[in-house]
Image (cartoon, rainbow, N blue to C red):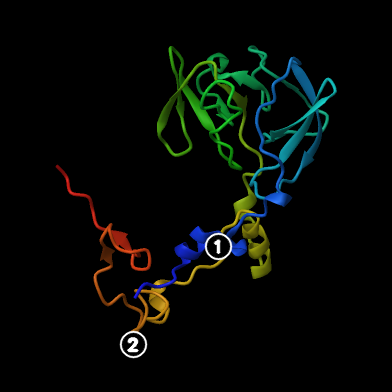
Amino acid sequence: MGKRLRQQRRGRGNPGYRSPSHRHVKDIRYPRLDATSGVIEDLVHAPGRSSPLAKVDFDGKKALMIAAEGMMVGNEINYNVPGKISPGNVVPIKNVPEGTFIYNIEGQPGDGGKFVRTAGTSATVVSRGDKVVVLMPSGTFKSFDPRCSATIGVVAGGGMKEKPFGKAGNKIHAYRSRSKATFTVKGQAMNAVDHPHGGGGHPQVGKPSTVSRNAPPGRKVGRLSPKRRK
């Protein structure tokens, strides 16, 4: 008999597993502007996002951008000015010197920024040519179109994980904004009617934990069987 597993309930999209989008700040992308500079008016908290946001005034047009480490209210940032390489400035990656830290990198020119947007992360420009090679936070090398834009510096908020939650309620509120499970119970600790790994006199799976890729949703827990190599 199939069990009602945690991933089944999450997949059905009940309110307890939905991220509260009505409390989130709008999608953060590079604005399309004619202005070449702006002034930081405020640094704001964004629920559901690990890094703070900077509210920038570009000659009367307001925009929200992912804040860089060291940004302060009143600082001036440059927008698509090739020679201005300082934290917070947005420039095409073809104009970024090798070894420079960048973040919020566009996957395609004009898409608004897709990569390296988490607090405390940064990528490094390795080489420039027909493609710009960037060392990603994961340690992999990725090639980008030289016309893609990126922000100079490191994403602010890097010390967020170092502060202890202190109590369970703080973790609940923090994880709720991102629709993440606060606590996880092992299947071995459940009863047999609640999970295929449950039951028994002491915590053990009691059977092979590798399941078929064709197993029904209530049975597909543990490790999937490996694919056959040709």
Between residue 136 and residue 131, name the one nearer to us.
131
Q: Is residue 154 visible?
A: yes
Q: Is residue 198 left or right of residue 85?
A: left
Task: Residue 177 in the image: state x and y as whole percent.
Answer: 65, 55
Which residue is at a point 50% across and 65% down the rendered structure image?
9
Q: Is residue 75 left or right of residue 177?
A: right
Q: State which quadrant residue 170 falls in.
A: bottom right
Task: Give the answer, above or below, for where 161 lies relative to 76.
Answer: below
CA–CA distance between discs 2 and 1?
A: 28 Å
Q: Which residue is mark 1?
A: 181
Task: Residue 156 in the image: state x and y as whole percent.
Answer: 66, 39
Q: Which residue is mark 2?
A: 201
Which residue is at a point 36% across and 82% down the rendered structure image?
199
Give the quarter of the figure containing the N terminus: bottom left
User: Which three-letter amino acid code belongs to the residue tagged 1?
Assistant: Ala
Badge 2: residue crowd in 10 Å (few <14, some 14–19, many ≥20): few
